[in-house]
């Protein structure tokens, strides 16, 4: 993994904050919630199951394989960790050791060495299409350590969460012609070399969006690895080359909350830093009114519980609840945008976020789009969504593969599954990334999904 000078400065600043806090004798870790350890042990169990069996992890198993490597890393066993990350890890470990209770890893160095034979090549796929490999932005990319270290900095009190802005902006669009909106999620990787492809998936998606020339462009959140100031600059603002005439918008996410929301609020949504999201204002939620439509972009990350690293969305603040309540009595059709998923991946269960939104709205919305899950999925009426037209659009940049769990699932009408077709052996299991284009009439919406090469994926 190669760090730019800006990343080195950012990590050095984090290490200096840690050293200063220790020197001042601050009560770091006071009130530390140890429930994170249960989550990380369950996550590690999933990774071991996938790699060594006897059976792979099932849908809705405890933990999340995304963090299956964390205990191995925290115990100082992971090889090839960049020096600045290693330095920050040592400071975090010093505090965690003083608190006590950090579990050892069940993964042995012999296991890890054996796994690397697969992980350094094409990798292994989980049933939801998660690509477990050491490739850039795949599950074992060493850069994900930034997410963990920044999250633990929050948990230990080294960094505080940025204040929430309760004043959301409403954009009124009055025109006789349709409103065209591009929608893409989990896009914040920035440019990088990806096998034999001409550009990274995020760049290819942005190029296709520019060709479609929508009136608005909405990112459903996630700037990697953890929404640091420099990452918001490089991988969101500088990489967003299309200036939509009626505005660009971006949502909060779990990865941006790992850095306490500082990069999102202070860089991306700060007009003194960039005019890119000027239409959105400086808040992480907004609404668009057009014809008989109210389109609500909501912040499901700020109040998400930390016990499992912000993975389960929540909307509990008074400002967004009022926005939802007012929308519910408007008589208009409602489309919801969130980063987090309101139902589980396989469409069998409504999550707490569903209850948060529907309770405040006073009814079911008509449509709901989200990211977070790195796939493109259209859910059927047989799913837990029922009559609500639910779509996952979290497949705009992160490398993914074929999701075998979805093959015969009656809850899913469609999922993106077009082979990437790259001759690089490390990309052998990959499928194409993509985005959605929504065309709103006064009382209608046409949904068209495209892959990163501009080919049609699905349409309503």
Image (spheres, rainbow, N blue to C red):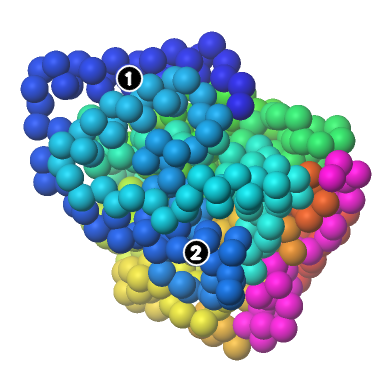
Q: Give left or right: position of 331 versus 396.
A: left
Magenta-colored segment: predominant secondary structure = loop
Q: Earlier in the sequence, mark 2 or mark 1?
A: 1
Residue under pointer 1: 15
Tell me which residue sits at (38%, 67%) in the image.
353
Q: Identify the secondary structure beneath mark 2.
A: helix
Given residues 247 and 127, the one toward you in this image is 127
| Left or right, 185 with reference to 285 | right
Whether 408 is among the magenta residues is: yes
Residues tagged 2 and 1 counted as in contact (Cβ below 8 A):
no
Q: Is residue 172 at least partly visible in the picture?
A: no
Q: CA distance from mark 2 to mark 1?
A: 31 Å
x then y, percent, for residue 436 = 71, 55
Residue 360 in sight from this viewpoint: yes
- Identified at 40% across, 36% down, the residue is 76
Q: Which residues are magenta?
A: 403-425
Judged by depth in the image, the label closer to the viewer, 2 or 1, is: 2
Q: Nearer the viewer, residue 192 or 283?
A: 192
Count up the numbered dots: 2
Q: Choose between 431 and 229: the one closer to the eye.
A: 431
Query: Compared with residue 247, is residue 313 higher up or lower down, i.e. above or below?
Result: below
Q: Residue at x 51, y 24 (%)?
A: 82
Task: Name the residue: 28% across, 26% down.
Answer: 91
Residue 457, above or below 430: below
Give the crowd class for mark 1: few <14, some 14-19, many >=20 residues within 10 Å: many
Q: Quadrant of the C terminus?
A: bottom right
Kindly identify which residue carries mark 2: 46
Image-based side of 263 in relation to 36, left or right:
right
Q: Position of residue 339 (x, y in %)?
A: 49, 54
């Amino acid at each position: 993994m190669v760090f730019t000078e800006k990343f080195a400065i950012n990590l050095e600043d984090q290490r200096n904050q840690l050293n200063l806090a220790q020197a001042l004798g601050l009560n770091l870790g006071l009130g530390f919630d140890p429930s994170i350890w249960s989550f990380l042990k369950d996550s590690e169990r999933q990774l071991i199951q996938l790699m060594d069996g006897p059976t792979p992890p099932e849908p809705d198993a405890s933990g999340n394989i995304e963090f299956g490597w964390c205990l191995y890393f925290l115990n100082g066993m992971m090889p090839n960790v960049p020096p600045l990350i290693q330095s920050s890890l040592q400071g975090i470990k010093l505090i965690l050791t003083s608190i006590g209770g950090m579990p050892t890893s069940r993964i042995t160095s012999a296991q890890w060495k054996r796994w690397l034979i697969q992980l350094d090549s094409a990798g292994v796929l989980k049933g939801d299409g998660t690509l477990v490999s050491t490739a850039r932005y795949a599950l074992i990319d060493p850069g994900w350590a930034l997410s963990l270290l920044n999250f633990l900095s929050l948990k230990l009190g080294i960094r505080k969460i940025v204040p929430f802005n309760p004043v959301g902006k409403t954009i009124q669009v009055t025109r006789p012609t349709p409103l065209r909106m591009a929608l893409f999620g989990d896009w914040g990787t920035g440019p990088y070399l990806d096998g034999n492809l001409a550009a990274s998936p995020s760049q290819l998606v942005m190029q296709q969006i520019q060709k479609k020339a929508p009136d608005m462009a909405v990112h459903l959140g996630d700037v990697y690895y953890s929404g640091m100031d420099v990452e918001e600059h490089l991988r969101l603002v500088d990489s967003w080359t299309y200036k939509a005439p009626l505005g660009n918008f971006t949502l909060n996410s779990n990865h941006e909350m790992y850095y306490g929301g500082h990069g999102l609020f202070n860089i991306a949504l700060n007009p003194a830093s960039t005019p890119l999201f000027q239409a959105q204002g400086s808040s992480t939620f907004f609404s668009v009114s057009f014809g008989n439509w109210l389109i609500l972009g909501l912040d499901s990350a700020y109040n998400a519980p930390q016990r499992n690293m912000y993975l389960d969305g929540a909307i509990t603040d008074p400002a967004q609840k009022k926005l939802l309540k007012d929308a519910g009595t408007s008589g208009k059709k409602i489309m919801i945008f969130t980063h987090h998923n309101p139902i589980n991946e396989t469409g069998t269960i409504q999550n707490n976020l569903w209850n948060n939104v529907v309770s405040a709205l006073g009814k079911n919305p008509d449509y709901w789009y989200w990211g977070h899950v790195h796939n493109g999925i259209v859910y059927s009426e047989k799913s837990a969504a029922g009559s609500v037209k639910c779509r996952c659009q979290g497949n705009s940049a992160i490398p993914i593969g074929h999701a075998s769990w979805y093959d015969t699932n009656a809850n899913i009408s469609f999922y993106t599954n077009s082979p990437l077709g790259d001759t690089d052996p490390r990309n052998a299991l990959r499928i194409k990334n993509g985005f959605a284009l929504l065309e709103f009439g006064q009382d209608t919406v046409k949904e068209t999904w495209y892959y990163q090469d501009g080919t049609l994926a699905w349409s309503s």
